[in-house]
Amino acid sequence: MRLFRVLRQGFDFGAREVAHWFPGHMARGVKQMKAKLHNVDCIMEVHDARIPLSGRNPFFQESLGIKPHLLILNKMDLGDLSQQKRIYKHLKEKGVENIIYTDCTKDENIRQILPKITELIGSSQRFQRAEIPECSILVVGVPNVGKSSLINSLRRLHLKKGKASRVGAEPGITRAVLSRIQVSENPLLYLLDSPGVLSPHIETVEAGMKLALCGTILDHLVGEDIMADYLLYTLNQKEQYRYVEKYGLDGPCPDIESLLKKIALKLGKTQKVKALTGVGDVNITVPNYSAAAYDFIRAYRRGELGQMTLD
């Protein structure tokens, strides 16, 4: 595959800073989780399988770690599963022992969750809840990692019932800890959904960029221009060139401006602007770079550019 020019060996973030998106409803969500903690038997943390090492809120382990903990790496169909052994090793070094990869459209992985939760609860002390027959599991995670979709999948699989939680493509759909949602009859299990809560201090600009590409931060807070640029850089670094075929290119593209121009022209995403000349105003047609960046980012999120783990 021919390269247009030498591809970049590093990414310059310049003086940019990723917005620390921690609005009022997130702070309220943290307080609600703490208040509910004494009534739960297990913590189920859901995270995006494309960023298994980045962006997890340390609050979930630091403040909720007194309860049995299961980490669900969801959206496994969008990640690079050849990296699983490396990811498991790294997470276990960080003290995360119980990990399950899931895809909410596939029952085979969802079936592993309740037996594992039952095992974790059975091997732990339930303190004041020892005489209570049912078990409650608090579902936590950063925004838009599929918590509600996972709850709905568990209900469909174990209760043959429909949706109990709203599902959306943007972060921020769940704004408060909800009432209990039953997901199993035998054993009798209830889940508590919770709002997505980012860390108030994202560790690095690059970690924030990975979170943004996976849709956990609203795009406009980061900027789709730099998100698309970082995505192109990462695809090239990991030798993921499916975008070349998707957009009909001659080979991998080294710079984002050239790529977005080609995407805009291919998709017919152009706009007319006025240009000042010596003989008056002239309307000219130019590529719509913002629309092209939007298409490029969403193509990655849909898995159209290949299954890629960002970490």
Image (cartoon, grey):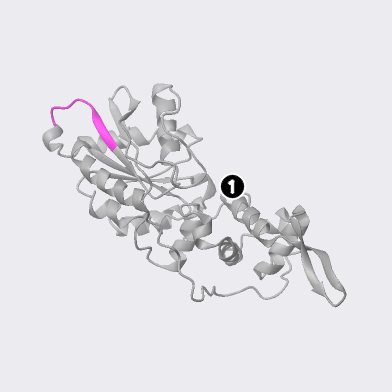
Rendered view: 62 above or below 250: above
Which region of the structure is painted magenta? 130-137
For the point 79% across and 70% down, the residue is 275
Q: Is 218 left or right of 8, judged from the image as shown?
A: left
Q: Residue furthest right?
A: 279
Q: Is 271 left or right of 229, judged from the image as shown?
A: right
Q: x, y (%) of residue 192?
A: 31, 36
Residue 133 magenta-drawn?
yes
Residue 135 magenta-drawn?
yes
Rendered view: 94 above or below 123: below
Q: Which residue is mark 1?
A: 302
Q: Residue furthest front?
A: 280
The amino acid beneath tag 1 is Arg
Residue 8's quadrant in the figure? Answer: bottom right
Q: x, y (%) of residue 236?
A: 61, 65
Q: At numbered mark 1, what does the secondary structure look like: helix, strand or loop?
A: loop
For the point 21% across and 34% down, the residue is 122
Rendered view: 75 above or below 94: above
Q: Residues within 10 Å of mark 1 (few under 14, many from 20)?
A: few
Q: x, y (%) of residue 99?
A: 35, 46
Rendered view: 223 above or below 68: below
Query: Mainly helix, strand or loop, the magenta region?
Result: loop
Quarter of the N terminus within the rendering: bottom right
Q: Is 267 left or right of 223, judged from the image as shown?
A: right
For the point 74% across and 68% down, the residue is 2
| Observer able to see residue 172 | yes
> Along the line of sight, which residue is nearer the eye, 257 or 56?
257
